[in-house]
Image (cartoon, rainbow, N blue to C red):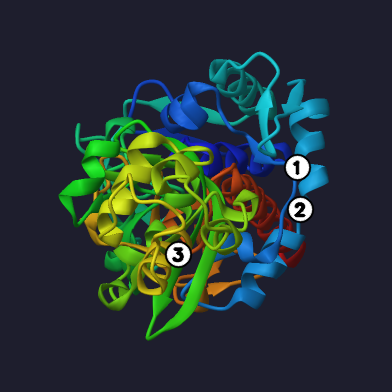
Amino acid sequence: MVVGAGAAGLLAGIFAARAGVRTLVVETRKEPGAKIRVSGGARCNVLPSKMQWDDFHTHGSMNSVRNLLQSWPLEAVREFFEIELGIPLKVEATGKVFPVSDDPREVVVKLLDALGRSGASLVGGLRIDAIQRGLEGERGAFQLAAEDGRSVLAERLCLATGGLSLPKTGSDGRGFEFARALGHGLSPLYPALVPLLAGEACWAELAGISLPVRLSVVREGKIAHARTGDFLFTHKGFSGPVALDVSWQFAAPDGAGATLEAAWLGESAPAWETLLTSGGRHTLSSVLREHLPRRLSDTLLARSGLAPESTLGALSREGRKALLRELNRCELAVSGNEGYRTAEVTDGGVQLSELRTATLESRQVGGLYFAGEIVDVCGRIGGFNFLWAWISGRKVGLAVASSQYERRSEA
């Protein structure tokens, strides 16, 4: 039985049932795949086009993450969607992979078709309220009770319930409660891929400005994490792919001591120091506005204590150093984040050390499996969390099928 008909749950159901396992997939919402339908700007960013190990992180063993990701290479996952499901895909300039149709419903429909053809049963609108392990000698290793009074017995159970992110899609974190009740510990939970809140009011005046930026997370004077990409000022703070990618560093329990620094324009920035030492009658404002949006250049000059009409020739050494700091290492005070309401994924979850890497089966509870966002594996923005969901769901489906085959062989 699979609890959760999202990306991971649907793949677990498809691959288990294909191998002959009697499979039931249950979903809280009447229509499965809610998060698939809203992802990628409601176009469904199915996959990334390339992958590196540092596109993912975990509180556990990265070697385990590598082994899991290698079990179904990115190219093979893409073939599954294009060839087996018949969904034409395209790679955009950002490196993200979308359906050619830009219609997320196509992905959901094709996955549900594959689930139906596999022989699995799907029940929507069934909210599981409690899960208990079956009593010794009784049929069913797990007893599941639904809110409407129905109950289900399952020999093997996969929890693919998602996390806490985007609660409007049905994610309420109940899977974490089930995991705890069944004896599992959790890594700290917090929102990731989430817009950050600014700690200074001046940035709100730049809302709507977007530009490439290199963001560095600094701890104790050293760069702990850095990303380059598109950055967006909002009325509340900072967003855009690059801000979302580093957001988990500030939401994590140890994130309070971190600072965020921006190098405006990233690798495409001009040689600022050369420009500022060239002298002449050009004003600082005119020089900066050739490369940066007007409102941003004015803000950086104000933070440097410099007048926009000051000329390059009159710029002091101290003034130049202050302006270079704002251009290359501008500190962006972060006061928090927008929370799970807008977060694209939940960081933390069921610890990898408590799961068997080869199967994602619980080490404590035989027959209990986990897949997708509920597990302590998190990817950056760009289809990486879907990739984890597809791979982990398939991993569980194949593992359940293998387990059933072994039991039949022993019998």
Q: Residues within 10 Å of mark 3 (few under 14, many from 20)?
A: some
Residue 109 lies, with reference to residue 217, above or below; the image says above
Estimate the x, y position of residue 337 in percent, counting from the top left: 25, 52
- SS type, badge 3: helix
Residue 48 left/right relative to 305: right
Residue designated by label 3: 324
Estimate the x, y position of residue 27 in percent, counting from the top left: 39, 33
Q: Amino acid at mark 2?
A: Trp
Residue 262 vs residue 92, the one in the foreground: 262
Residue lying farthest left? 201
Estimate the x, y position of residue 190 in percent, counting from the top left: 30, 60
Residue 231 left/right relative to 152: right
Which mark is in front, 1 or 3?
3
Residue 289 lies, with reference to residue 363, above or below; the image says above
Contact (CB < 8 A) between labels 1 and 3?
no
Contact (CB < 8 A) between labels 2 and 1?
yes
Identify the residue at image location x=38%, y=25%.
Answer: 124
- SS type, badge 2: loop
Residue designated by label 2: 72
Instruction: Give the label on residue 77, or none.
Output: 1
Which mark is in front, 2 or 3?
3
Q: CA distance from mark 1 to mark 3?
A: 45 Å
Identify the residue at image location x=46%, y=58%.
Answer: 313
Residue 108 vs residue 281, the one in the foreground: 281
Residue 65 left/right relative to 232: right
Residue 364 lies, with reference to residue 25, above or below; the image says below
Q: Amino acid at mark 3?
A: Leu
Identify the residue at image location x=42%, y=51%.
Answer: 243
Instruction: Give the label on residue 275, or none.
Output: none
